[in-house]
Image: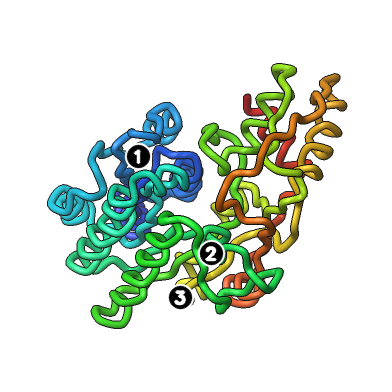
Amino acid sequence: MQVFFELILLVEMASSVVTGGAGFIGSHIVDALITRGDEVTVIDDLSTGRRENLRDALRAGATLEVLDVRDTAAVAAVFARVRPQHVFHLAAQIDVRRSVTDPWRDCETNVGGILAVLEAARRTGVERVVNTSTGGGLYGDATRLPTPEDHEILPLAPYGQSKLAAEGYAALYARLHGVSTVSLRYGNVYGPRQDVHGEAGVVAIFCGCLLEGRTPVIFGDGHQTRDWVEVSDVVAANLAAADGAGAAVTGAVNIGHGAETSLLDLVEALDRVGSRRGLRLPPPRFVAARAGEVTRSCLDVGRARAELAWRAQVGLEAGLERVLTSV
């Protein structure tokens, strides 16, 4: 009888691959998959991801394959061995400024990487590929706010252009080969484990300033807005896009709060959170705006609500509390 139940559990256990799974967002997805009982294989070259982000997951049975997602043969070998049902593709070159100085490497990683994943998925019969994309990086200075998925694509850097190409390949493999794919266009994701990495790490940078009493630096006047979304909400969106009714959703889906928050508002919110801990954030120092920076960004998340039955749950101050608690 015990063997019978063990066989049932084995049959019901899903197998998932997370590329970039040692990174900020990817490692949180790995944790959620492990918690629900998946067999999880992480593909990460550890160039920006951190093994320590996977400490608990590895202890719980996850497997880490240290390899470059552009290595098509190595990716194919992993897929052939583990036969995943779900793939969460997060491995990417995410530094917008680096994409400007080295667009070729950006393209190799973001376009070559998803091609390696899609080919491996096609050959092994993967049920669902959830591709990570970007909202603000694609829409640029949008003329409609909140910005819907059908807005004109106007990237201001090669990073956005490569992510657009990756979305195109995901959609192509759905049409040409029947691979079920969806691309989630994130707002500005923040939360525990976030690296201080360009604009994407502004919350982490400012939290560090609060804890260390350093003066935060704002490029421009601080009135530029972003759509910040906490990482646990992004994890929930990924799971919703992989399972149940969400597994039928295709194309691009915005994932954000659907609200604009300026950098000045972020500073005020962080100062309020810090004051409850006896900490004060020094007044910011303003420097010249960076060329090519999006002025306003806010995502229309109506499709995610209607088709994924998903909406962001974590407010900004609660999210900031989580970041500070994790440090």
Q: Residue at x 85, y 19 (%)?
A: 278
Q: Pointer 2: what residue?
A: 240
Image spot of residue 231 (x, y percent)? 59, 47
Label whose residue precedes the other's in the sequence (1 or 2): 1
Q: Residue at x 26, y 53 (%)?
A: 108
Quadrant showing the C terminus = top right
User: Residue 251 shows which numbered tag?
Assistant: 3
Q: Is residue 1 visible?
A: no
Image spot of residue 222 (x, y percent)? 75, 44
Q: Is residue 9 visible?
A: yes
Q: How is the image coloured?
A: rainbow
The foreground one among 98 and 94 is 98
Left or right for 144, reference 192: right
Helix, strand or loop at disc 3?
A: loop
Label 3 is placed on what type of residue?
Answer: Gly
Helix, strand or loop at disc 1?
A: loop
Image spot of residue 170 (x, y percent)? 34, 70
**In front: mark 1 or mark 3?**
3
Label 2 is placed on what type of residue?
Answer: Ala
Q: Pointer 1: what residue?
A: 62
Mark 2 to mark 3 CA distance (whole Å): 15 Å
Helix, strand or loop at disc 2?
A: helix
Q: Is residue 280 above or below residue 262?
A: above
Q: Is residue 71 above or below residue 219?
A: below
Mark 1 to mark 3 CA distance (whole Å): 29 Å
Q: Is residue 150 above or below residue 103?
A: below
The foreground one among 179 and 13 is 179
